[in-house]
């Protein structure tokens, strides 16, 4: 059984989607710890409601970024975590942490990488940029995390239509419902079943 550690900072809608999928879709995994960079994140309540360990670890409480990375890594390793999931985590992870869990950290980005990604593209900013550009399709991407922001190997993508009367908030909600909440649990299932093989910067899905 794959043990998952989840990093959060906000409401935890993707965390909820993953917990629900584990319960209903037979994903051979369990979330053993949810760590938030924000003590007031509602995601912590979602974890507690499921009986999952919920703790706060803030970067500012550590001597420097490397010390924070080491503490996070030790926290998850001590719980036997085999996959770290970023579900709306707004703190930058350094190379120390990323290297400890190479190709074992998943993130979801609310656009079709390599469009609208990289430094500064997060949350509503992504959807604002999509609408400003006037593209007709957006979506979501699940990828492994590398030291380059949004630059790791792509696992799954799903497109979502952009409508003429969209606002950033409306588009954000539709991307979550039609793409994020579907492909994030699916990517975790594929990982848990040993079906993801990383080759360079590409991911091959085994049949």
Image (cartoon, grey):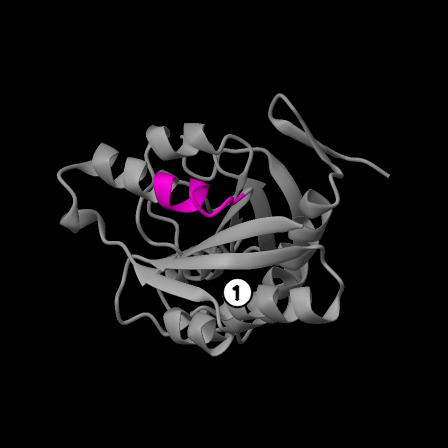
**For residue 125, above or below residue 79:** below
* Viewer-closest of 112 and 81: 81
* Residue 78 in magenta stretch: yes
Residue 159 seen in the current view: no
Residue 106, given in percent of the width and then of the height, sits at 53, 45
Q: Nearer the viewer, residue 7 or 114?
A: 7
Counting from the top left corner in percent of width and height, residue 172 is at 50, 68
Q: Position of residue 144 (x, y in %)?
A: 55, 38
Residue at 61% of width from left, 38% of height from top?
154
Residue 101 in the figure: left or right of residue 181: left
- Locate residue 137: give its quadrant: bottom right
Looking at the image, residue 194 lies above or below residue 161: above
- Magenta residues span 74-81
Where, quadrant-wise, is the C terminus in this rendering? top right
Give the residue drawn at x 59%, y 64%.
Answer: 18
Q: Residue furthest top?
A: 200
Dot 1 falls on a residue whose secondary structure is helix
Residue at image mark 1: 14
Q: Is residue 104 visible?
A: yes
In the picture provided, is 123 more to the left or to the right than 172? left
Residue 150 inside the magenta-drawn segment: no
Q: Position of residue 62 (x, y in %)?
A: 16, 44
């Amino acid at each position: 059984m794959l043990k998952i550690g989840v990093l959060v900072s906000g409401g935890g809608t993707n965390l909820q989607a993953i917990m629900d999928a584990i319960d209903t879709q037979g994903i051979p995994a369990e979330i053993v710890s949810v760590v938030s960079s924000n003590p007031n994140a509602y995601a912590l309540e979602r974890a507690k409601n499921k009986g999952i360990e919920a703790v706060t670890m803030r970067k500012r409480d550590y001597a420097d970024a490397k010390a924070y990375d080491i503490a996070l890594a030790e926290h998850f390793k001590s719980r036997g975590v085999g996959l770290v999931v970023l579900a709306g985590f707004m703190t930058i992870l350094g190379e120390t942490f990323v290297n400890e869990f190479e190709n074992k950290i998943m993130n979801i980005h609310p656009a079709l990488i390599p469009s609208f990604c990289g430094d500064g593209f997060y949350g509503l900013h992504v959807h604002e940029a999509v609408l400003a550009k006037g593209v007709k399709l957006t979506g979501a991407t699940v990828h492994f995390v590398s030291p380059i922001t949004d630059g790791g190997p792509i696992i799954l993508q799903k497109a979502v239509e952009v409508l003429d009367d969209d606002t950033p908030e409306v588009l954000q909600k539709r991307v979550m419902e039609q793409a994020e909440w579907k492909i994030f649990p699916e990517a975790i299932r594929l990982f848990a079943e040993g079906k993801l093989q990383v080759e360079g910067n590409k991911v091959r899905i085994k049949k």
